[in-house]
Amino acid sequence: MSLTLNKFFHVNINVTDLDRSVDFYKKLGFVETARFVMDGHLGESTAEAFGVPFNRHRAAFLKLEDSENNMVLDLCEYEQPPTSGQPYQSLINVGMVRLAFHVPNIEEVYQELLDMRVEMLGPLRFTTPPGGTRSGVLAFKDPDGVILEVLTGVEHMAN
């Protein structure tokens, strides 16, 4: 018998200010589908399952409005104990270092991000990856410094 995982459900990002982060991700095209508090027995059970001290945290589930894959972005603000630490500052660390999104018009998105005054890791760049399709890529940070990537022209590589 082999283990079978059948569907991505969510990606979790811990944040220091849930309301600020929800507002930021809504500006990127996400819609909030749920908001809740994990405490009491539910908080104890979750903490035990994750191997962390008893906790209380607020969370919000968000989805991309026009997404076909139903992936959920799970934003969590830990209150007891509080969210701590810093996200990776470099893309060369071991582990999950960025979350990437496909867009049809990367130049337009780049300008919108500049207008929002988000911190960019570098300028928008274009390249031709394997397969010969021109693609664009840019990377920026969310309000807590989590690295996000936007790209276009690589759809053929995922099929």
Image: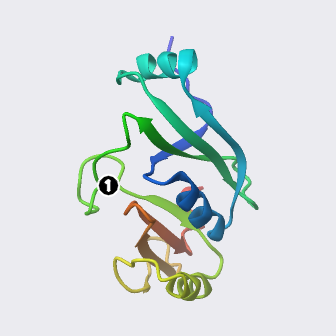
The number of numbered badges drawn on the structure is 1
Q: Residue at x 53, y 52 (%)?
A: 18
| Horizontal and vertical percent position of residue 124 | 44, 85
Give the residue drawn at x 55%, y 23%. Answer: 4
Location of residue 104 (image quadrant)? bottom right
User: From what the image shows, is residue 72 above or below residue 19?
Assistant: above
Quarter placement of the C terminus? bottom right
Please tell me which residue lies in front, 155 or 52.
Answer: 52
Q: Is residue 40 visible?
A: yes
- Residue 128 image position (x, y, % from top left): 44, 80
Say which quarter of the image contains residue 88: bottom left
Residue drawn at x 44%, y 38% as measured from the top left:
79
Foreground pick, 59 / 95: 59
- Element at badge 1? loop
Q: Residue at position x 65%, y 64% from top?
A: 26
The way the protein has been coloured in the rendering is rainbow
Q: Position of residue 152 (x, y in %)?
A: 56, 75
Under mark 1, the amino acid is Pro
| Vertical order, 96 against 112 (above or below) | above
- Please state if 47 lies on the left or on the right of 113 as rendered: left
Outermost residue, top direction?
1
The answer to whether 122 appears left or right of 90 in the picture is right
Location of mark 1 (residue): 87
Is residue 129 visible in the rendered image? The answer is no
The crowd level at tag 1 (other Cα within 10 Å; few <14, some 14-19, many 20+) is some
In x, y percent, where is residue 24? 57, 66
